Amino acid sequence: MFVLVLTYTKPLEEVDALMRDHMAWLNAGYRDGHFVVSGRQIPRTGGVILARGDDRDAIEALAAEDPFVSGGVASVEVIQFRASQTAEGFEAFK
């Protein structure tokens, strides 16, 4: 599993200009089975995405395709971890 931590590097106006494209990218990630959950950080300084997979290179390539990242308004940190425990109902996401 992976945690993708997005950090905005440009003003929110520039981030918001790419929001539609970012949402389309997120929706594709959910549709393709990569993403489990996502949302904005509070305060709004970036976002967090929980992704499933075993191939770090593939997840890093996917993260680089985020319009926020490719558009230069955010950086992304990819953190890989092994889910060893889950709450009931989350077993399928390991």
Image: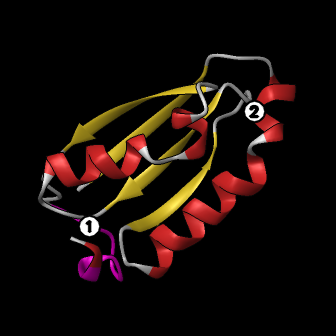
Please tell me whether mark 1 or mark 2 is closer to you in this view: 2
**How many numbered circles does the render carry?**
2
Q: Amino acid at mark 2?
A: Val
Numbered label attached to residue 15 = 2
User: x and y percent of residue 29 in the render?
Assistant: 46, 68
Q: Quadrant of residue 9?
A: top right
Q: Is residue 79 left or right of residue 50?
A: left
User: x and y percent of residue 57 in the render?
Assistant: 16, 46
In which quadrant of the rendered image does the C terminus lie?
Answer: bottom left
Q: Quadrant of residue 58?
A: bottom left
Which colour scheme appears in the figure? secondary structure
In which quadrant of the rendered image does the N terminus lie?
Answer: bottom left
The residue under label 1 is: 86
Q: Amino acid at mark 1?
A: Thr
Residue span colored magenta: 85-92
Q: Quadrant of residue 26?
A: bottom right
Residue at disc 2, secondary structure: helix
Residue at disc 1, secondary structure: loop
Viewer-side residue, 55 vs 61: 61
Label 1 environment density (alpha carbons within 10 Å; few <14, some 14–19, many ≥20): few
| Point 37% across, 77% down: residue | 33
